[in-house]
Image (cartoon, rainbow, N blue to C red):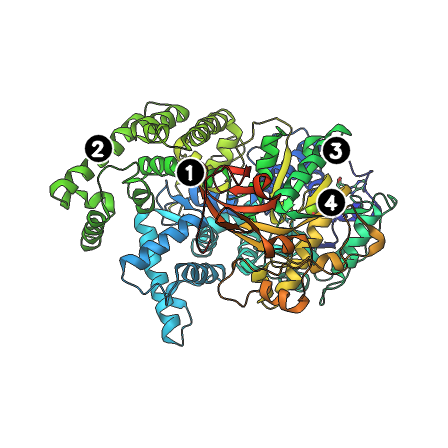
Amino acid sequence: MIHSLNPQQQQAVTQPAQHTLILAGAGSGKTRVLTTRMAWLMQHGVSPYSLMAVTFTNKAAREMLTRLNALLPIDTRGMWVGTFHGLCNRLLRLHHQDAGLVQSFQILDSADQLASVRRLIKGNGIDDEKYPPRDVQRFINAQKEKGIRPALVEAYDPHTRRLAEIYELYQVQCEREGVVDFAELLLRAYELLQNNIPIRQHYQQRFAHILIDEFQDTNPLQYAWLTLLGGQQAQLFAVGDDDQSIYAFRGADISNMKSFERDYAKGNVVRLEQNYRSCGHILDAANALISNNSDRLGKKLWTDAGQGESIRIVEKASDALEGQWVVEEIKALINDGFPHDEIAVLYRSNAQSRVLEHHLFSSGVPYKVYGGQRFFERQEIKHVLAYLRLIDNPNDDTSWLRVVNFPTRGIGARSLEQLGDFSKQYNCSLYRAVPYMTGRAGTNLAKFVALINQLAAQAQMLSLPELIEQVVHDSGILEHYKSDREGAERLENLQELVNAAMVFVTEEGLLDEVAGRIPVTTEPQAIDDNGNAVLAAMSPLGAFLTHASLEAGDNQAQAGQAAVQLMTIHAAKGLEFDAVFITGLEEGLFPHENSLAELNGLEEERRLMYVALTRGRKRVYVTLAQSRMLHGKTRYATRSRFLDELPDENLKWLTPRNAAPVVASSWSGGFGRGGSSSWDKARETYGGPGGMASTVAKSGLIVGDQHFRVGQGVRHAKFGDGTVLTLSGSGNEAQAQIHFREAGTKTLALGIAKLDIIVGG
Ligand code: ATP
Ligand code: MG
C-alpha cells in the first residue's frame, strides 16, 4: 500500500500519532497521502469509528471513500467522511433536540435564503434600497461565519445596528419555519459542541484522528469547530496548498494554516514536491501564472513526466461559437479514445454552463453538470420540492409562498398580505394563520391547506417516487405544464425528479449518509444531556429533501453512464482529468469583475486559474469568446490578463493570436451596475477598435425598415425574446444567428422571420 509512495509521502503516511501539516502544491499526492493514512491507521488497529475526514465538495468526499475502499476491503458507509456541511447536518440530525431544532428541519440553499430575507424585509416594512436583500444576506452569513449571533454584533453606527436587528428578525423567522441556512448548519453544530458538555465529550473521546483535506479553505468557524471536536485527544492531520485557496469570499483564511502550524503541528510540516498529475507544459504554465501572486508560502513543484503537449488556446467570436467548438473538440477527443468522464469543461460562473449544455445536448454527447445551481434549482423542480417541504413541515413559509398560488388558485397578493398580518399578530406560520381568514380568500386558502394535509396523509402510504408523482398530479402542476409552451421540457425534468427519488431510495447507503442514520453496528448510541440514548431517524422524504439541498445538481445524469463533466472551477478543486477545457477567459468574467474591486481579489482569481490549469493531466485547452450572452445581455470582452501571464513556450494558439486584446467599439449594455465596471475600465485602458465583433456591431444590417445590430434584443412570435449573436449577408440573403433565451440558438433569414426589435434591449 505504501510502497508506491515516494519517501516524503511514506513519511507522512506513517507519522506517529502527532499533529501534522502537509503543505504541498497541486497534484503532489496530498489527497492520496490522506486517504492512505486513513487506511494505514486502520491497518494498525485504529477503528474506523474513531476516524473522521473532512473535505469541501460532495464529489471529493465520495472520491475519498472510493479510494479508501480500493485500499481496504471495509464497509465505509457509516464512517464520518464528508463535507463540513454534511457532517454538521449529521450531527444536528442526531442531536436535534439539544441543538434546539425540529428534527425535520429543512436546509435553505442560498437562493432560498435570499427569498426568505427578501420576504422578511418586505414584511417588516424595511427600506430595501437602504437594506438590499443581497447585502443583508451577505451580512448575516458573514456574522455567522465569524460565529457571531445578533446580540453580539459589534455595531457602532445606526446602519449596522439596524442590520443586526434584521439579522435577529431573520433568526426568529427561521426558527418559526424550522429552516436552517448553510452558515447556520456550521454555527449550530459548533454551538452544540461548545455548550453541551456530554455531547462534546462523547465526540472528543470518539475521534482519535481528524483528517482535513483542502485545509487552506477552512474559515475561522470551521477551524474552531475542528479544534473543538478534536479536543485534547485527537490527532489533527491537515493537508493543504495556500496557492489553491479560493474561498476567501466565504471567509476562508490562509492564516489558519499558519495558526495550525504554530499551535498544533509545531514544526511538523511535510512538504511534497513531485507532481504526479500533469505533464511539463501544464505545470510550467501554472507555476509561471501563480508566481505573479505575492505573499505565498512558497513551494517548488517538478515532474518527471516530460513536457507533454502545449496548452491549446482558442478564441471565438461568440460564446455560442466557443461552445460549438468545445463540443466538436470533445467529439474528436472521444474518437481518439479519451473516456467521457476524463474530459472536463470548467467555467468561472454557473451561468456559462447553459450554452455548453445546449451544444452538448444537441450533439448527443452525454454530460453531467456538477455543483449547485442546476437541476434542483430549476423552477419546476423547486415548485415540487416546495410542496414536498410543506408536506414535511407545513410551517415552512418560504415554501408556502412559493406554491400557495402556483398553479394559480385565486389567492392574490392582497390576501397573502392579510394572511401575513395574521401570522404576525398571532406569531404563527402562514399555514396556521389560515383559519383567521374569511371570505373567498379564506375558502381558497382552506382548500390549499386541505390539499397539503391530504398529500401529507398519503405520504404515509406511498413510496417517495410515488409521492412525487402524486404531488405533481394533485397540485395541478401536471395540468399547468401540459398547457404551457415550454411545458414538455419541464415535465421531463419532473420525471427526472421522480427518477432521482427512485435512485435515492434504492441506494440505501446514500440514504444513511444523508439522513445521519448510521448503521447501528458501528455507531454506539449517541447520548443526550440526561445520558439517554438518542438516535435520529428521518423519514425518506425528509432525507431526500436534505439531499436535494446539499447535493443540488448531482442526480441529473443517469447513474453509471460515462459522461463529460461540467462544473465550475470551484467545484473542480481536488479533481483531475485527462483533458480539461477552461472556458471564458475574458476580463470581467475571469478574473471576475466583482473580484477586482476587492482587496486581494485578483490574487484569489489567479489562484482559481491555477487550480483550473492543474486539473489537467495530459491536455489543457483555454478558450475565450469576444462576445457573450450573460443574464440576457451581450457583453464584449477583452482577453483575460491571465492568458498574457502564461509563458509563450507552453502555449499553442489554434486560432490567430491578436496582437492586442480584442475590444468592441459598441458597448451594448452593462453587466454590473453603473458605468464603472471593470469592463468599461478595460475598454478605456485598451481603447481602440479591434476584432470582428466590433465591425459588425458598429455597422449592423439594415433589412426593410429595421436596423439590426449584434447584441441587440429581438422578439420572435414563436421563439420569444433573444439576442442577435451574428449578422451576415445582405438583402434577401441577410441572416442572423439569434440566441433565444428559451428556444436556444437559431439562424433566421431576416427578410422572412418576423422579428421585433426590443427598444433598449
Ligand atoms: P490537489 O492539490 O489538486 O488536490 P493532491 O496534492 O491532492 O492535488 P492527489 O490528487 O493526491 O494530489 O494526487 C495527484 C495524482 O497523482 C493522483 O492521480 C495520484 O494517484 C497520483 N500520485 C500521487 N502520488 C503518487 C506516487 N507516489 N506515485 C504515483 N502516482 C502518484
Ligand atoms: Mg487533493
- Tell me the residue at 40%/31% (across/down): 487
Nearer-N-terminus badge (1/4): 4
Question: Looking at the picture, how far across and down is residue 29, in whole percent?
Answer: 75, 45
Q: Nearer the viewer, residue 335 or 108?
A: 335
* Left or right of residue 105, residue 629 in this image: right
Cα distance, mark 4 to mark 3?
A: 12 Å
Which residue matches tag 2?
A: 450
Q: Residue 466's image quarter?
A: top left
Few, some or many C-alpha atoms within 10 Å of disc 2 (few <14, some 14-19, many ≥20)? few
Q: Are marks 2 and 1 in contact (CB under 8 Å)?
A: no
* Left or right of residue 510, residue 541 in this image: left
Q: Nearer the viewer, mark 2 or mark 1?
A: 1
Q: Are marks 4 and 2 in contact (CB under 8 Å)?
A: no
Which residue matches tag 4?
A: 621
Few, some or many C-alpha atoms within 10 Å of disc 1 (few <14, some 14-19, many ≥20)? few
Nearer-N-terminus badge (1/3): 3
Q: Nearer the viewer, residue 304 or 231?
A: 304
Which residue matches tag 1?
A: 717
Q: Is residue 611 visible?
A: yes
Q: Regarding mark 4 in the picture, which secondary structure is present there?
A: strand
Q: Is residue 539 visible?
A: no
Which label sits on residue 358?
A: none
Amino acid type indicated by mark 2 = Ala
